Amino acid sequence: MTGRIWLRRLWPLAPIIGSLAITSGLLLLFGVSPFEGFGALIQGAFGTQAKVLSVAAFWVPLTLAATGLVVAFTAGLWNIGVEGQIVMGAVAASWLALRFDAPRPILLAAEILIAMAAGALWAGLTALLKTRGGVHEIFGGLALNNVAIILTNFLISGPWQPPEGGTFRGTVPFPDKALFPLLGESRLSPLSVLLTIVAVAAVYFILRGTYWGLKLDALGRNPRSAFLLGVSSEREVVFAMMFCGALAGLGGAVRVLSWFDSLRQSISGGIGFLALLVVMLALFRVILVPFIAFFFSAVLNGSISLQLRTQLHSSLGGILTSVLVLLVLLFGDYRRLGLFGAREGETLADE
Amino acid sequence: MHIQLEDIRKYFGEVKANDGISLEFMPGNIYGVLGENGAGKTTLMKVLSGFHQPNQGTIKIDDAVIHFGSPADALDSGIGMIYQDPLDEPNMRVVENYVLGRSGMMAFDQKQAKRELNAIAESIGFEVNPREYIDTLSLGERQQLELIRLLSLGADLLILDEPTTGISADQKKLLFNSLQKLAHQDGKIVILVSHKLSEVQELCDHVYVLRRGKKVGEIELPTTKQELVDLMFEELPQRTERASHVKEQAMLELQNLHVADGRIAVGPLELEVRAGEVFGLAGLEGSGQQLLLRAVAGLEDIEEGKIFLDKLDITRFSYHRRKDAGVAYMPAGRLEAGLVAGLDLVEHFVLAEPQEGFVIQRERYQQLTKKRIEEYKIVGQPSSNVEELSGGNQQRAQLALLRKPARLVLLEHPTRGLDVRSAEWIWQRLFERVAGGTAIVFYSADLDEIVERSDRIAAFSGGRMSRIVRADQTTTDELGHMIGGEI
C-alpha cells in the first residue's frame, strides 16, 4: 500500500520526464546532445543576471493573464479572447501615454486603470455575446482577438504613426514619465511584480473563501443546478469574464510600458495563448500558476540562446512546453487512468 | 443461462453496501429484488452488471466464474441493466441512439437499423418512431428504447432499477407485459429492483428481500402483501393521521394564467392555494403540471395573467427574486438540475441560503449543514460531495436545501426513489412547515401519495386542469379517470 501511495505522490513528475524524453529524442534526431541542448537552455534562461531579469519580466504579464484565466475557467468559461484583452489593455494604456500629460504617479495609475477597464470591457463584450446573443465565448473571443489586432495595426499605421513616416512597426517611444520605473538596465518593473503578486493572492482568496468564488465554481460544474440553487448565471458570467479581462488588460499595459516602450505590432506576442497552456498545466489551480508561468518563461527565454549555441530553431522551447501540456492533460490524472488501485466514479452508495 | 452470485461483498469506505449476499437466477423467471432505501439493491445490481467490482465474492454464469471489468463486459456476457436515472445522452435521433455503442459499425445502414429496431419493438409490444429526437421522448419511452437496445445487443438477463418511477400507468402496463413475454416465452431472466410491494406482487415469480446489505429472505409468489412487508421491515411503518392546517389567508393566487412551452400550453388558469394547504397535482408526465409549477417558480415565461404570493404581485419577479420573496422550489432532476456534482453539502447550503457579506463564514454553514443532515437523516458528512450520496440521500439533501422559512414550497416528485418509511419521514418534515403556515404545491407520479398527502387535488390532462377535488372525498380511481381526460 505504501508503495502505491508513493507512486501516487510522484505521479505528477511522469509527464515532465516524458516530455523531456521526447524533446531529447528530437535533439538527438538533429544530432545535438540533449545535455548540450538543455544546458544551453538553462544557460540562456539563468546564465547572467540580465537573463534572469528578462525571464522575470516576461513572467509578469503571463502570470497576470493566467491568473485571470483561472477565474474564467472556474466559471466554466473558455476565454480564448484573453489575447485580444491583453491587446486592448495595451492599446488603452498607449493612448494615455501618447496623448496625456500629468505628474508621473497619477499618469501611471491612470494607465493601469484604463488598461484594466479596456480589457474588462473587451471581455465583457464576449460575455454579453454569449449570454444575450448565444455566441459561444470561444468564437466570440476569437473574433474579438482579430478585431483587437486589426485595431492595433490601424493605429500604428494611421493616427499614431510616427511623424518620420510609416515603418508599420510601432508608435514613437512614450515619454519616460509615462513608462513604469524599471530595475536597472532590465525590462522588469518592480511595480508590476507587486501588482502580479497582489492579483495572485486576491484570486486565491476569492476562490477559496468567498461567495463569489463558490458561485463561479458551482456555475462551472453545473450551470443549471447552480442557477436553481440561487446563482444568478448571467451576472456571474459577465463578471468572471470582466475580472479575467481586467488582469489581461493589466498584462497588456505591462507589455507596452515596461517590456517595450511603445505600442508595437503583435504587442502581446502570443502571451494570451501561452497563458491558456499555463492554466491547463496548473490544472486550474491558481497557486500553481506563478510557478508554471515561471517555468514557461524560463524555457522560452532560454531557447533563444539555444538557437545561438546549437543552430537549432528556438521553437524547441515551444515544443517542450507544448508536449508537456499534452502529456499532463493525457496522463496527469492517475485516477482517470485507473492506476494504483484508484477508480473513477466510485460512489458512497447505500442503496 | 444460469447465474449465481456467491458471497458478494462491496464496501464504500466504512459503508458495507453489500455484506455477503448470495442469490441465484434461473432462465424464464422474473425476479424481484426488494428492500428499503439503503438495503444494497442497486449496488448489488451494479456489481452484477459490471458497473462496480466487488471487494469479495464471485459471479458464475452456467457454473463458470466470470469477472466483469465494465458494463460492456457484462453485456458481452448477456447481462444488461436499465438504470434508475437514464444517462444524459447527447440529443440524437432514436435510431442513432439505437446503433450507439455497437462496435464495427463505421457507417451504419439507417434503413437496416430502423427495420431491426421496429422488429424488436413490435415483438415486445412497443411502438417507437426512429426519426424522433431523444429529448422529446418521455421517461417511459426512453426506457423502452433502452430495453430494445439491450435486447438487440443480445442481453439474456435484464435488470431494471425502479423502472416505474416517473412513467405513466399505461407505460407501466406495456412494460410489464413485455417483461412477462420476455421471461415466460423467450426464456430470458428479468430482475426487477423495487421498493414497491404491489409491483413486485404483480410481476414477479420469485422475490429476494435485502436489508442492510444482507439477504434476509426469499419467497415464491404469489404471496400476501403482509408477508412481504414483514420481511422487508423490521418494524411496520406507521402512517399517521394528520390534522388539517388550512388557513383563511390565500398564499398563492393565479389569475387568468397562460403559460406554454414548445410542447404544451396551459391556461387560462384560476387557482387559489391557502396558507397551510397542501395542493396535489396529478397527471401523466408532460400534461402541464410541471409547466405550471415551473411558471410559479419563475422558470417559465408567462404569456398572460398574474401570480400573487400572499397578496404580492410576483408576476414579473425573476426566479431568484421569488426565492427571496419566499418561494422554495425543488426540481425533479438530482445531479442534472438541482445539485452540483463536485461540491460538498456545506457548499450547497452556502449557495442556497441568502448571502451574507462577501467572505463565507464556513463554520456557520458547517453547523447548519450538520443540523439539516440530522434533521433529514442524510447518510453522509457535511464534507461529502453530493455525487457520493445515494439517490435517496440526494433526494433528502434537496429537500433539506429548501429555505426555511418559506411561504410557498413547490415540489416535483417529493419522495421519488424513497421507500415507505423514508417518504413518511419526509412528509412529516413537510407537514411541520405546513403547520407553520407554508403552502405546498406538488406533483407526483404516485397517485396514492397525492391522495394521502394533499388537502385538495387537481389533475392535468393535455394542458387542461380538471375540477378541484378534496383529497378526503376522492380516490385514486377517480383521479385515474381525471388524468385520463374526464375532467
Image (tube, helix red, strand yellow):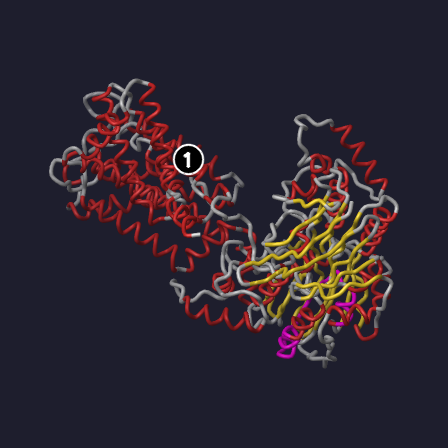
On screen, B309 above or below B190? Answer: below
B130 left or right of B435 in image: right
Q: Is there any visible trace of residue B287 in the rendered image?
A: no
Chain bearing tag 1 is A
Q: Position of residue A6 (x, y in %)?
A: 38, 48
Q: Position of residue B438 (x, y in %)?
A: 63, 74
A222 left or right of B45 in image: left
Which is nearer the eye, B295 or B86? Answer: B86
Q: Position of residue A156 (x, y in %)?
A: 28, 27
Q: In the picture, which quadrant includes the N terminus of chain B?
A: top right
Which residue, given by chain and number where applicable, does mark 1 sit on?
A: A327
Which is nearer the eye, A218 or B182? Answer: B182
Q: In the picture, which quadrant includes the C terminus of chain B?
A: bottom right
Which is nearer the eye, B399 or B47? Answer: B47
| Magenta part of the chain | B429-452
Is residue B271 located in the magenta-colored stretch of the structure? no
Which is nearer the eye, A82 or A133? Answer: A82
Q: Secondary structure at mark 1?
A: helix
Q: Position of residue A296 (x, y in %)?
A: 30, 36
Q: Which residue is depicted at the point 51% across and 38% down?
A: A135
Query: Image quadrant of residue A307?
Result: top left
Residue type at numbered disc 1: Leu
